[in-house]
Image: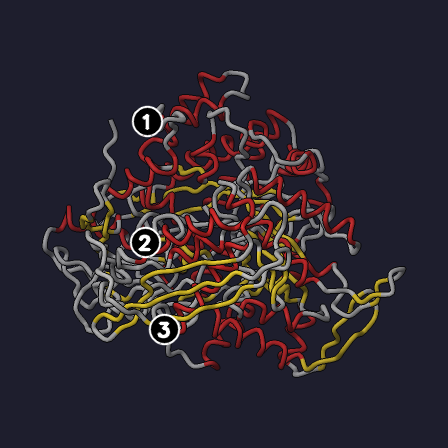
Amino acid sequence: MTRFAAPIAEQIWDMKYRLKNADDTPIDVTVEDTWRRIAKATAAVEQDPPKWEDTFYNALEDFKYLPAGRITAGAGTERTVTLFNCFVMGTIPDDMGGIFDMLREAALTMQQGGGIGYDFSTIRPKGADVKGVAADASGPLSFMDVWDAMCRTIMSAGSRRGAMMATMRCDHPDIEQFITAKSDPARLRNFNVSVLVTDPFMEAVKTDQPWDLVFGGKIYRTVRALDLWNAIMRSTYDFAEPGVIFIDRINAANNLGYCETIAATNPCGEQPLPPYGACLLGSINLARLVSDPFGDGAALDDTALHDLVRVAVRMMDNVVDASRFPLPEQKAEAKAKRRIGLGVTGLADALLMVGARYGSDQAARLTEDWLHRVARAAYLASVDLAREKGAFPLFDAEKYLASGAMQGMDADVRDAIAKHGIRNALLTSIAPTGTISLYAGNVSSGIEPVFAYAYTRKVLQKDGTRTEEEVVDYAVQMWRDRKGDTPLPDYFVNAQTLAPLEHVKMQAAAQKWVDSSISKTINCPEDIGFDDFKEVYMAAWDQGCKGCTTYRPNAVTGSVLTVSDEKTATEAPEAIATDAGEPQSPHGDVVYISEPLDRPQALEGNTYKVKWPDSEHAIYITINDIIIGGHRRPFEVFINSKNMEHFAWTVALTRMISAVFRRGGDVSFVVEELKAVFDPRGGAWMQGKYIPSILAAIGGVIERHMIDIGFIAGEGMGLKSDPQAVTTIARGKACSSCGGYEMRMIEGCMTCGSCGFSKCS
């Protein structure tokens, strides 16, 4: 039986990927059972299933090939789920009926667990005429709010956290409002947002030219291109969004440019897709393919890589036929083009094993070489599949080989495609692998650098206690096993110590051989100057990247883990987050008190009035505070109304919230739970914002009170100044899965370092 490399790996498997009965009893007794389940399901469409089941099992064994989370969790379960991670939905029509048809499709897709991407550029701008009704258009952002509410409704009904991407063209008249939309921390919380940047716009930025904002052939306004670029940069600098997608470059390099136009990506950006396109993802674990790691002959095993890629391509092609699809349009699109997204993970660990410093010229050359090997093997494997099973239905040899992406491909590969066709229109992509990388033994994620070589993780036990365990990077653990106490060499660098332009260099090196795109986060120091920050994006453009996503910690986005200076094998650099200098668990830890706090004779508080549009009587919410150690914290809540229809639930809510508050610790999660409740009859607009239910309105009042008294630093920011906590550091948002404060931006997606949760996995 396979031994997991780390306790966190087994916990991730048990929590996310292990097949269980409804009563939580395991069906997959061991991880070998999980691999066998996946192998059997993907081999079922073959003419000789037993043969290919064994072949696929061997690829999965020892975590060499890692199918994306949807496949690992869903293949062979007979559940009504899709094995595709994400979708770009249909083009949104510029009319009310069509818009809500698209909303319905989005809800059905998310209900089956698929993330979605949409281009909102097709909706007329705010203030434009609406013919036939003598009214002005509300604009695309108002409909994005509706999509966001839908996503939260689906999530509150029991589905996994929704993931959505919204894009808008840089020449849309509402682009300035789109750029700053997420500066409001309560708005569009289920969206990632990115601007579709065109080649002419980048030329206008570089030459400081005017830029027209246009819709339907009408110029609404002309702005200075550089001013618009600086607005994008400033918002990203302050709020980590929007991202930037170089959309013309994507379409020019698309193998299928002759039969599709791309205007959106999946939520994490690694798959630019046409309407109803789907991303099918999997990763080769490079960290498992290095021979003689840390030795004189350390190198990537070319034969093992080639063989593994060929098997992975076949498995992924079979998933197209084995998977369910939320919509018939998605099934038709997938089968017409059979695009897959085979990528890699463990790149940084593999570089460490061969002695290359991530971000160096040597590492960039190796990355380009290794990704070239992956692409070459994948294309040749797909040609062989075409000889056996036929090319994808929309294959046109002349047009396909004339595409931009094919111009740099090896001549023998091009000749093979011309002669035999190709089974899969596009084959390579670098997806977020945060969770599956933890599952594989905490290998470095995707093509990202190692985030932290080791950190202490607090694990909540069933009895309410917390234990500590060390989480060690896969390559660092291997170094310890082989080198003992020998200090880590200088080429052991991590995400916190790399210069941003070194990140760009690595992304650009990988992009040369990735026919889709790459999900990667360029970590920037908090004190980076604005001009230097802008240079990161211009470097990404100049070096041929298809997009760029950065993360700069600040008061709005939250802090990130830092790394200590110690570099010994027995005391690897720990992830810490503390203002006082003493090592703490990442982002601190919350201590829950076993006995409720005593109530003083008198308490101070505030009473708030909420008038719900559908209720004749207002609701009054009183929140009383207790002061401990000079710090104010919420202690009890009273909710009252003359409306007797509210009596039972307001009494119940009063008692439950007060009981939680009196236990101490970080009780800010109460806000998140209340705000996630949606009324099936619909919510209401209050002070310009859509509130999905009365309970959500109450949650908003409690949140504002917590902010006003200094208990939390802002929406979802956790404890700000609470004497019941171990530390009072500024922290990022709490993980919606485990409640821990170890969220960090990796591969364009917030990922929890404690439980591995990611809305993109």
Q: Residues within 10 Å of mark 2 (few under 14, many from 20)?
A: some
Label placed on residue 709: 3
Whether residue 253 is visible:
no
Q: Earlier in the sequence, mark 1 or mark 2?
A: 1
Which amino acid is tagged 3? Answer: Ile
Question: Are circles 3 and 1 on residues that touch, CB within 8 Å?
Answer: no
Quarter of the rendering containing residue 68: top left
- The alpha-carbon separation of the residues under discs 2 and 3 comes to 18 Å
In this rendering, the label closer to the viewer, 1 or 2: 2
Q: Disc 3 on helix, strand or loop? A: loop
In the rendered structure, the answer to whether residue 36 lies left or right of residue 336 reads left
The front one of 576 and 596 is: 596
Residue furthest right as drawn = 132
Disc 2 target residue? 660
Position of 273 relative to 194 (above/below): above
Residue drawn at the location 64% of the way across and 66% of the way down: 197
**Are dots 1 and 2 in contact, CB under 8 Å?**
no
Which residue is identified by label 1? Answer: 32
Q: Quadrant of residue 196?
A: bottom right
Q: Please say if 755 is above or below 632.
A: above
Q: Nearer the viewer, mark 3 or mark 1?
A: 3
Q: What's the mark number on residue 73?
A: none
In the rendered structure, which amino acid carries the disc numbered 1? Glu
- Calculate the distance from the C-alpha at mark 1 to the C-alpha at mark 2: 42 Å
Quadrant of the image occupied by residue 357:
bottom left
Instruction: From the viewer's side, name the closer residue of 725 and 404.
Output: 725
- In the rendering, at what x and y percent does residue 104 appear? 67, 43
